């Protein structure tokens, strides 16, 4: 299923991604932000179990701030899982 999440507190504006029936993550695209880094994150998490991605990215900060693009992805995935139920 395709999801879109509006980020807060980061340079990226929103994130799009798909969660497959087997709870794996696909097609992550960040809009805005540091293009090279975010493309790298998107490729690294491709096909990973959503729960594993959340566990690895949750709580990462950027420049000492309260959140980051990876953290926002973990928040987006957590919300998407809640909405699936």
Image: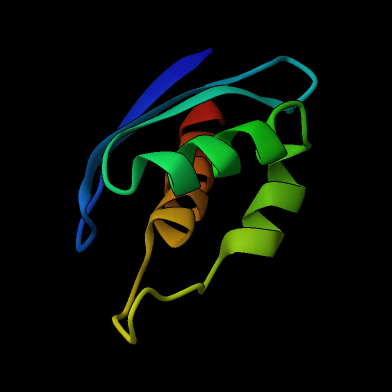
Residue in view at x 69 percent, y 61 percent: 55
**x, y (%) of residue 60?**
50, 72
Asked where in the image residue 43 lies, by quadrant, the reply is top right
- Vertical comparison of 29 with 34: above or below: above
Q: Residue at x 25, y 48 (%)?
A: 7
What is the x, y in percent for residue 6?
Answer: 23, 39
Residue found 73% across the figure and 27% down from its top: 23
Name the side, left or right, on which 22 lies relative to 79. right
- Residue 13: x percent and y percent? 19, 41
Residue 74 visible from this viewpoint:
yes
- Tell me: residue 4, above or below residue 20: below
Determine the residue located farthest toward the bottom in the rendered image: 64
- Quadrant where the C terminus is found in the figure: top right
Q: Is residue 75 left or right of residue 34?
A: right
Nearest to the observer: residue 81 or residue 58? 58
Q: Position of residue 20 (x, y in %)?
A: 68, 16
When asked about the image quadrant of residue 29, the answer is top left
Q: Nearer the viewer, residue 80 or 8?
A: 8
């Amino acid at each position: 299923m395709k999801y879109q999440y509006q980020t807060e507190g980061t340079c990226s504006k929103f994130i799009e991604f798909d969660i497959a029936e087997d709870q794996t993550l696909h097609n992550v695209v960040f809009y805005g932000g540091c293009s090279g880094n975010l493309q790298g994150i998107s490729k690294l998490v491709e096909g990973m179990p959503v729960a594993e991605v959340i566990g690895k990215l949750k709580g990462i900060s950027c420049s000492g701030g309260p959140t980051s693009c990876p953290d926002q992805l973990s928040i987006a995935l957590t919300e998407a899982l809640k909405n699936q139920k």
